[in-house]
Image: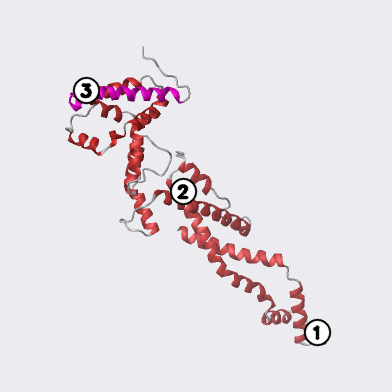
Amino acid sequence: MTERWTGVGDQTWRSLAERTANRIRLLQADLADEDAQTRRSIVADEIRAALEKIIPQDREKFLEALEERFPAWESEAFGRAQTAAPAASVSATDMAEFNDPGFLIRQLQKLAEQMSPDQRLKAATELERAGISTGGASGVSPEVMERIRAAVQVGPEAAIDLDRLVSVMSVMLEKVVSLNDIATKSWKQMSHGARGRTQSNLARLVGQYVSNNEQVGSLQISEELESFRRLTASLMLALSQTGQAAYQQMRRLHPEEIEGIIRNEPRSMMQSNEVRCWRKYKELAEAIDPASVEADILRVLAGFVNDWVSKQSR
């Protein structure tokens, strides 16, 4: 039965790494007259035997320690030896390394520094297909990337940095959700129960969609964003109607309006039309209530928003 090193501190796998390194050095000396394939096969057996004595969580640290004692394994000479070997014959050492996730991860980490953004994207996509995902922005389809390029106005030759893209999109999403809440609250205050959007579901729907909730699809997100766009645009356009709405409120104090009112009232022989108009003006001006004026203006603006949104929905 193989003895399993249970891992007390660093001493177990470090001691084993040192012993294994010494053992490999002795084997290299004893096998100096053997061919490279035989030497590599025996060394691989020695490494596998050592790995079987270590608990899985310590194996990667063991291999790293072993690599530190044999830096020549990664030298140019070692690379030439691998290249010179026939493609069909993979040594036992190669197989041991290729089957070790820790070794493969370390190699990918070394290569990642030299990879272009597009190469990183392709690698992330392949890992995603294999079921290896960290929850990041991997596996972006070409169609989505094309839409992103069009939205940010960059050509196909420009490399998209996914980290920067996600960073910018997270800020944009935060601002959109905040603006959506403000627009919804403003419409609720303006409409006073009129038909239309009175509550926002954007943040909740986006959260459910990106967390793979099967009950929320991309169509729902698109519809919610379109609703937000229409409401925000209509509120901005409604500002252009504020002056006209205010003018209609003040129109009641226009001289022609006042003259029309006193013509329909009983005429006094003791007062001239000018005096009667002035007294009517003062009466109407003193009756102006700021709250009612604001309510009337908001009513006009709400009507404009409803009409504009209805036209956009057709």
- The residue at which mark 3 appears reads as 31
Q: Which of marks 3 and 1 is nearer the N terminus?
A: 3
In-front residue for pair 117/169: 117
- The residue at which mark 2 appears reads as 221
Q: Which mark is residue 268?
A: 1
Q: Residue 84 carries which label?
A: none
Q: Residue 80's x, y, as percent?
A: 21, 37
Amino acid beneath label 2: Ile
> Neighbour class for label 2 at 10 Å: few (<14), some, many (≥20)?
some
On the picture, is 210 further left or further right than 105?
right
Q: Is the magenta stretch mostly helix, strand or loop?
A: helix
Q: Residue at x 40, y 58 (%)?
A: 152
Q: Which of marks 3 and 2 is nearer the N terminus?
A: 3
Bounds of the magenta span?
10-37
Quadrant where the image shows the N terminus:
top left
On the picture, is 66 further left or further right than 29?
right
Mark 3–mark 2 distance (CA, rounded to whole Å): 67 Å
